[in-house]
Image: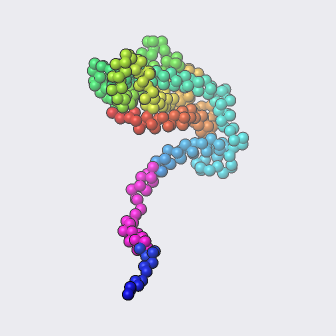
Amino acid sequence: MSTMQPAVPATSAPAAYSSVSALDEPRRGFNWKAAGRHLFLVIMCLWVILPLLWVVLLSFKTLQDGAHNWIWPRNGFIHPFLTHYDYVLNNPRKVGPIWTLFKNSVLVTMLTVVAATVMSVLAGYALVHLRTPGSRILTALLVASMFFPTQVTAIVGIFSIQRRLGLINQTWSLMLPYTALSVAISIFIMRGVFQTVPKDLIDSAKIDGANSLRTLGGIVLPLVRNGIVVVIIVNFVAAWGEYLLALTLMNDLDKRTLPVFLGSASGGVGGLLWPRMAALYIIAIIPALITFAVAQRWYMKGLQEGALKT
């Protein structure tokens, strides 16, 4: 005679298994380290962004609100909205030759960027992939030169050389000292980028009969284009905002660059009150912001690929 055993519910085993697994699963606490890092990054971003936003807001205030220290305008924004920008750009007799100064800055910056980029690419490639006598000594001298305020200590020598060459008060000639002052950091950056290129690739090109220039232009440059963008951005920012040499080497107002005019206008030249000064500052930084916004992706990739590594 067979005995009947009670049937076990089909859901009992999975339920027991799920309860055990739920108890065994470790509880995750709050990640204080990640929260602290994010909080620090947010504070640093606000530290940079808030002053810029304050200047933008100031450029749209009325002259009455611009004379007080409150952040939000109490009398409303100026109407028309771009009145201060129009005043700065279209009153050369009262303000100054803004368009001429802007063109001077663009000219000097473009010449500096081109010269410094070409020199740093050639020098960086030679230091890494060519047999250059004393390459370690040259690299050490380049690194050492970056620890000295060359722009301040060498200003007398730069002025003397420019005067002997007859280049005083020649706007385009500013690219010569600008390039000389930025070429060290540019070569150092490109040296770090070229070190990421395998030497076997260079040797293979030589075996195939390619000379050094052909190897550099056809094989290596496409691989280091992100590093070149880093050099372009660094030189662009340095040349666009340079003040001391442009003030010392240029005598006439229409030969100077925009940063020199900003320095003189801050003292009240041309009747530029604070809202108009803010509009002028925004106009001056727009090219740098646009350049960085366009090249940001390649700039960050260049930093990650070794542009600032030794």
Query: Which residue is most to the right?
Result: 80
The number of discs equals: 0
Is 39 a magenta residue? Answer: yes
Q: Quadrant of residue 107?
A: top right
Position of the C terminus, as image quadrant, is top left
Q: Give coordinates of residue 38: x percent, y percent.
A: 45, 52
The residue at the point 65 percent across, 32 percent down is: 88
Is 93 a magenta residue? Answer: no
From where the camera sits, is residue 155 visible? no
Q: Which residues are magenta?
A: 14-41
Q: Quadrant of residue 64?
A: top right
Position of the N terminus, as image quadrant, is bottom left
Q: Give coordinates of residue 241: x percent, y percent.
A: 50, 31
Left or right: where 119 falls relative to 266: left
**Residue 310 vertical placement versus 39 (above, below):** above
**Residue 32 vertical placement versus 116 (above, below):** below
The residue at the point 51 percent across, 29 percent down is: 240
Q: Quadrant of residue 189?
A: top left
Q: Give coordinates of residue 259: x percent, y percent.
A: 53, 30
From where the camera sits, is residue 172 visible? yes
Q: Give coordinates of residue 5: x percent, y percent.
A: 40, 83
Q: Main secondary structure of the magenta part?
A: helix
Q: Of 176 and 117, which appears nearest the observer?
A: 117
